Image: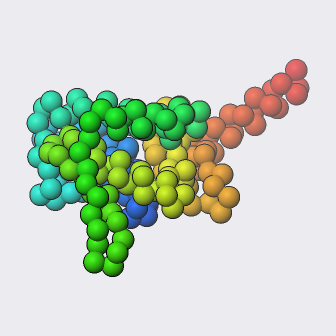
């Protein structure tokens, strides 16, 4: 799977168990990067890259997907909402199916059409990520003006910036200058 929304921020996508959820969260418009769910042609182009031929969207689907993305994004923001919000989003009626593989493993697969299909696929990844404890590594950048979602690959899961160069260093420099100014006053 490609991750065009995530790669436009020069980030590596999350592992396969969370790649779609990660890319979906990064469809938000940030800075000069446009919102990939803003209109039907742009959203269709994004969807054709991440789930080729699996779903077709309508204008109504875009409203549903933007609302779902906003709710899901709140969960990865540093001072995010309680995890129960994911269950509330899923409770809106998303179709999914459990499939028994030939090796005996059970897999949750997306169902429905349009926004319902995309939402079910993303929620299936969130569930899989929670089961292997990788969901907590998806985080929104601490920079209030940014909030790009990144997969924290640090050993102790302590990353807070999607990019130290563009978000971390300027914020750390501002904090350093503020502390020096306060100390000299």
Q: Write the residue at 20% across / 40% down.
A: 115
Instruction: Provide residue 96's location: percent of width, then percent of height.
Output: 26, 50
Establish if 155 lies above or below 63.
Answer: below
Instruction: Provide residue 146's location: percent of width, then percent of height.
Output: 48, 37
Q: Is residue 5 visible?
A: no
Observer-nearest of 131 and 49: 131
Instruction: Provide residue 17's location: percent of width, then percent of height.
Output: 40, 61
Instruction: Provide residue 50's location: percent of width, then percent of height.
Output: 24, 57
Query: In the image as oriented, which residue stretches furthest toward the right?
Result: 184
Left or right: 43, with 78 as reference point: left
Observer-nearest of 139 and 111: 111
Left or right: 46, with 171 as reference point: left
Q: Write the residue at 42% across / 52% down.
A: 127
Q: Write the residue at 33% across / 49% down.
A: 122
Query: In the image as oriented, which residue stretches furthest toward the bottom?
Result: 103
Q: Is residue 129 visible?
A: yes
Q: Write the residue at 75% across / 29% down.
A: 178
Instruction: State the quadrant of the N terminus.
Output: bottom left
Observer-nearest of 179 and 18: 18
Instruction: State the quadrant of the C terminus.
Output: top right
Q: How is the image coloured?
A: rainbow
Name the quadrant containing residue 170. Answer: top right
Counting every numbered tag in the picture gives 0
Left or right: 44, with 92 as reference point: left
């Amino acid at each position: 799977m490609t991750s065009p929304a995530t790669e436009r921020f020069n980030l590596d996508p999350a592992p396969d168990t969370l790649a779609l959820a990660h890319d979906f969260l990064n469809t938000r418009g940030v800075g000069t990067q446009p919102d990939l769910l803003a209109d039907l042609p742009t959203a269709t182009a994004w969807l054709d890259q991440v789930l080729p031929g699996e779903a077709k969207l309508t204008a109504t689907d875009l409203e549903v997907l933007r609302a779902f993305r906003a709710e899901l994004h709140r969960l990865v923001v540093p001072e995010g909402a309680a995890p129960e919000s994911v269950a509330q989003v899923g409770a809106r009626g998303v179709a999914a199916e459990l499939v028994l593989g030939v090796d005996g493993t059970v897999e949750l697969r997306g169902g429905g059409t349009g926004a319902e299909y995309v939402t079910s696929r993303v929620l299936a990844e969130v569930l899989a990520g929670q089961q292997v404890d990788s969901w907590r590594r998806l985080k929104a950048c601490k920079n209030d003006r940014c909030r790009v979602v990144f997969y924290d690959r640090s050993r102790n899961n302590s990353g807070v910036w999607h990019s130290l160069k563009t978000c971390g260093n300027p914020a750390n420099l501002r904090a350093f200058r503020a502390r020096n100014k306060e100390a000299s006053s």
